[in-house]
Image: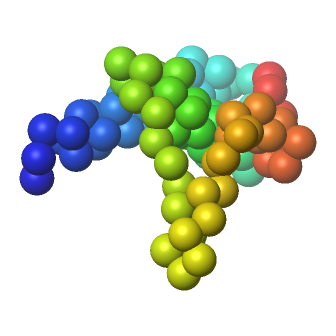
Amino acid sequence: MNEEQKKFYIELRKIQDFAIGTSLCKQSNYKKTEDMLEDVTYDVIYMICEMIDGYRNDLIKYNIVNVKNDNVINDKIALHDWCEEYLRCTDI
């Protein structure tokens, strides 16, 4: 694994740790386990989208390419801006 790949996975680990820690701090506020899981997965997906968009990890921007047709799905958009519209989050 090269250094850039290592940095990528280190950032993913930071995202995972943050999402778990945040949800554990709010654990008593949740009435259903499903609500907590929605928030944890939302936070992880949102932060991964931020990372792809270049808002984390030393401001490195990534492209997501459909290898069948070479289309870049995050061309001219910030993925994290669309999370709220498409993903569920109870936001306790």
The residue drawn where x is 77% and y is 32% is 81
* 36 and 4: which is toward the camera: 4
Q: Position of residue 5 (x, y in %)?
A: 22, 45
The C terminus is located in which quarter? top right
Q: Is residue 39 visible?
A: no
* 75 and 85: which is toward the camera: 75
The residue drawn where x is 11% and y is 47% is 2
Q: Position of residue 51 (x, y in %)?
A: 49, 32
Residue at the far right in the pictured view = 85
The residue drawn where x is 28% and y is 42% is 9
Query: Tag count in the figure?
Result: 0
Residue at the far bottom in the pictured view = 68
Residue 60 lies left or right of residue 43; in this view the side is: left
Residue 55 lies left or right of residue 17; in this view the side is: right
* 52 and 71: which is toward the camera: 71
Residue 45 lies left or right of residue 51; in this view the side is: right
Q: Position of residue 8 (x, y in %)?
A: 30, 40
* 75 and 32: which is toward the camera: 75
Colour mapping used in the image: rainbow
Q: Is residue 56 visible?
A: yes
Quadrant housing residue 84 = top right
Q: Position of residue 82 (x, y in %)?
A: 80, 40
Residue 47 lies left or right of residue 36; in this view the side is: left
The residue drawn where x is 84% and y is 49% is 86
Above or below, 71 relative to 19: below
Quadrant housing residue 12 = top left
